[in-house]
Image: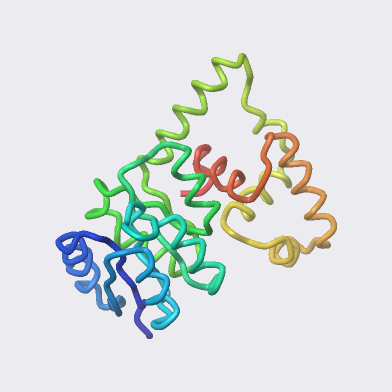
């Protein structure tokens, strides 16, 4: 079985060493490169073609969010995991919008890093458990302030099923194939889901699913 090829991008050498140590203890993982700024990460991603990149969110020359956007635009197959101290919705939404597949809090990296890499390498999203709880608390507080209720229960069983698949990163075509539906039917369900939940793009769909713990 081929190893998961990983690029580590962080401007602190001691952090890079720590991440490398944790990853290379795994028989199925190989760190193929280390870089210390965003521009270097874009260049290294193009040169090395890693399966997964561990990307610090705050780096010199080009921040992790912008670097991720450039990397994923060039090669959507690379799974980027954003490494951050921030658990709030604004940072996560920016990360998702850039094309990141994972969001790992620095204070949980020691316990969650290996699983995050394995999950993202398997083409599925990963988010630190603490992120979901913070998002849920913020969301409930927002609903109370606005006098609103969560609309999740307005979704049909089929819409809930499609919501999860979309949040997992499946395309409309993939969802249609999995559920034996036409692409047009999936697109119609997707439109209805977004209207009912007041969502506007794929990043917000993923954010909602993390908040509701529909995906881990």
Considering the image in quadrants, where does the N terminus appear? bottom left
**For the view shown, which residue lies furthest in the left direction?**
14
Front one among 180 and 97: 97
132 vs 20: above or below: above
Identify which residue is drawn at 43% across, 39% down: 132
Instruction: Name, please, the residue furthest toward the front.
Output: 61
Q: Is residue 132 above or below residue 112?
A: above
Q: Position of residue 165 (x, y in %)?
A: 63, 55
Give x and y (percent) for residue 183: 81, 62
When the figure is inspected, residue 161 is found, relative to residue 47, above or below; the finding is above
Q: For residue 29, which quarter of the picture?
A: bottom left
Side of 150 relative to 21 (left or right):
right
Coordinates of residue 26 in the picture (x, y in percent): 24, 73
Identity of the residue drawn at 59% across and 52% down = 167
Residue drawn at point x = 78 percent, y = 41 percent: 192
The quarter of the displayed image where residue 76 is located: bottom right
Tell me residue 73's x, y (percent). 56, 68
Drawn side of residue 167 relative to residue 188, left or right: left
- At x 37%, y 59%, the residue is 116
């Amino acid at each position: 079985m081929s190893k998961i090829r990983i690029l580590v991008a962080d401007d602190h050498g001691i952090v890079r060493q720590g991440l490398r140590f944790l990853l290379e203890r795994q028989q199925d993982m190989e760190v193929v490169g280390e870089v210390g700024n965003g521009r270097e990460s874009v260049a290294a991603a193009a040169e090395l073609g890693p399966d997964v990149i561990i990307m610090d969110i705050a780096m010199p020359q080009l921040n992790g969010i912008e670097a991720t956007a450039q990397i994923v635009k060039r090669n959507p197959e690379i799974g980027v995991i954003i490494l951050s101290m921030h658990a709030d919705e604004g940072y996560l939404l920016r990360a998702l919008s850039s094309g990141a597949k994972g969001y790992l809090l620095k204070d949980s990296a020691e316990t969650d890093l290996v699983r995050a890499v394995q999950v993202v390498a398997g083409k599925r999203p990963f988010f630190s458990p603490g992120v979901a709880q913070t998002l849920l608390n913020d969301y409930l507080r927002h609903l109370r302030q606005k006098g609103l209720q969560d609309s999740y229960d307005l979704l049909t069983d089929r819409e809930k099923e499609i919501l999860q698949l979309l949040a997992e990163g499946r395309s409309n075509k993939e969802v249609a194939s999995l559920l034996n539906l036409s692409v047009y039917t999936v697109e119609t369900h997707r439109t209805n889901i977004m209207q009912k939940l007041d969502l506007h793009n794929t990043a917000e769909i993923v954010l909602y699913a993390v908040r509701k713990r529909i995906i881990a």
